[in-house]
Image (spheres, rainbow, N blue to C red):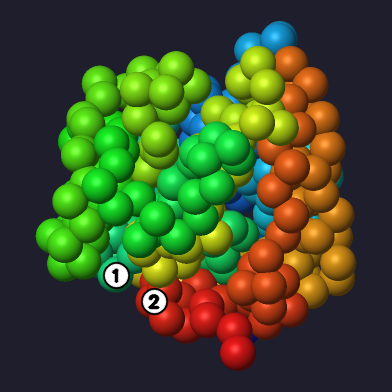
């Protein structure tokens, strides 16, 4: 009987080893440790952030960032190997699939705003977009006021056409606003001179210009209908431990200069599968953001003086 306390202590010591340490993990990190896998949500046509190449493999700027996060998670959990599962998402499914645990990270072009932060969290901003217009260089249009009395197209059902309508009324511009069924139809109207300009997210406009027959014939306005809106990699809400790892990984990537190199790769060079070059130089706001990583949803926080 005298030996029982000793045996009890030995048993307690054994139980306090690695299994207990594993139990200290919570949320996403715990699930990744237990399953040996992490699931990335990807978009099939969000060029150049997340899209399918000729081999139907997800590639892009956001995918590269997510793979850096995967490396950091693997290191944090001291795993010899970590399986990466890929799950397609859409605008409609990305938040529900994150909330129900189907995906662990969403690698795309999702805007980080206060409304979405009620449902999900985001890591540090990897891109800033704004609503601008594209027109033919020969038209010599750059400012919103240059559109006065002209025919301007935007895609029906978007925030962009709403912003155009609001600016038209507020500035009394007398613009003839033409709704298009999709982005391709809207851009075609500018190409065929049925509209002088097309209002949309600037990065999408850059993609359309790059894929056009004569990219050099078009210009994207410096004037914007909206403030800079941040894109971020999405993760589950209230998962503090996982967000700490993800934030550290993205902050290290951006501040080291590697983030700028990835930007050059996807926005200033030819990208698969068609060899398009979006020719979109990094702006001062994103440069500042990379130097000072932030997950703020507030557009005003990205202003540079």
Residue highlighted by disc 1: 114
User: Which is nearer the eye, 63 or 159?
Assistant: 159
Q: Which residue is drawn at 79% across and 21% down?
A: 275
Q: Nearer the viewer, mark 2 or mark 1?
A: 2
Residue 185 rendering spot, x and y as whole percentages: 36, 18
Q: Few, some or many C-alpha atoms within 10 Å of disc 2 (few <14, some 14-19, many ≥20)?
A: some
Q: Do the residues labelled 2 and 1 touch (CB within 8 Å)?
A: yes
User: Which is nearer the eye, 232 or 128?
Assistant: 128
Q: Residue at x 85, y 54 (%)?
A: 261
Residue 222 rendering spot, x and y as whole percentages: 54, 60
Q: Few, some or many C-alpha atoms within 10 Å of disc 1 (few <14, some 14-19, many ≥20)?
A: few
| Residue 170 located left or right of residue 183 | left
In this rendering, does residue 17 appear at all? Answer: no
Cα separation, mark 2 vs mark 1, equals: 8 Å
Q: Residue at x 55, y 35 (%)?
A: 136
User: Which is nearer the eye, 22 or 223?
Assistant: 223
Q: How many marks?
A: 2
In this rendering, does residue 257 appear at all? Answer: yes
Residue highlighted by disc 2: 298
Q: Which residue is drawn at 71% across and 9% down?
A: 55
Toward the top, the furthest residue is: 55
Image vertical order of residue 142 relative to residue 14, above or below: above
Q: Quadrant of the N terminus?
A: bottom right
Residue 29 found in image quarter: bottom right
- Look at the numbered disc 2 and give the secondary structure of its residue: loop
Residue 208 rendering spot, x and y as whole percentages: 55, 28
| Residue 77 located left or right of residue 258 | left
Image vertical order of residue 237 relative to residue 106, above or below: below
Image vertical order of residue 105 relative to residue 153, above or below: below
* N-terminal label among 2 and 1: 1
- Look at the numbered disc 1 and give the secondary structure of its residue: loop
């Amino acid at each position: 009987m005298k030996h029982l306390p000793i045996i009890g202590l030995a048993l307690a010591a054994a139980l306090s080893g690695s299994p207990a340490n594993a139990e200290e993990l919570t949320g996403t990190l715990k699930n990744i440790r237990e399953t040996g896998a992490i699931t990335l949500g990807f978009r099939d046509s969000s060029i150049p952030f997340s899209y399918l190449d000729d081999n139907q493999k997800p590639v892009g700027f956001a995918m590269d960032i997510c793979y850096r996060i995967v490396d950091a998670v693997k290191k944090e959990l001291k795993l010899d190997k970590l399986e990466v599962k890929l799950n397609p998402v859409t605008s409609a499914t990305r938040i529900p699939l994150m909330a129900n645990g189907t995906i662990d990270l969403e690698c795309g072009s999702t805007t980080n705003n206060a409304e979405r932060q009620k449902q999900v969290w985001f890591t540090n901003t990897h891109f800033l977009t704004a609503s601008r217009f594209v027109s033919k260089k020969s038209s010599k249009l750059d400012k919103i006021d240059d559109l006065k009395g002209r025919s301007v197209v935007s895609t029906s059902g978007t925030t962009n056409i709403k912003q155009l309508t609001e600016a038209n009324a507020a500035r009394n511009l007398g613009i003839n606003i033409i709704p298009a069924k999709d982005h391709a139809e809207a851009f075609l109207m500018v190409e065929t001179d049925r509209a002088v300009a097309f209002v949309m997210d600037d990065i999408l406009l850059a993609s359309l210009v790059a894929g056009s027959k004569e990219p050099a014939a078009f210009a994207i306005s410096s004037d914007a209908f909206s403030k800079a809106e941040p894109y971020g990699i999405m993760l589950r809400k209230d998962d503090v431990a996982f967000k700490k790892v993800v934030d550290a990984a993205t902050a290290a990537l951006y501040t080291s200069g590697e983030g700028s190199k990835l930007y050059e790769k996807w926005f200033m060079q030819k990208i698969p599968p068609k060899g398009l070059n979006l020719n979109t130089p990094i702006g001062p706001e994103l440069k500042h953001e990379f130097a000072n990583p932030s997950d703020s949803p507030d557009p005003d926080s990205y202003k540079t003086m």
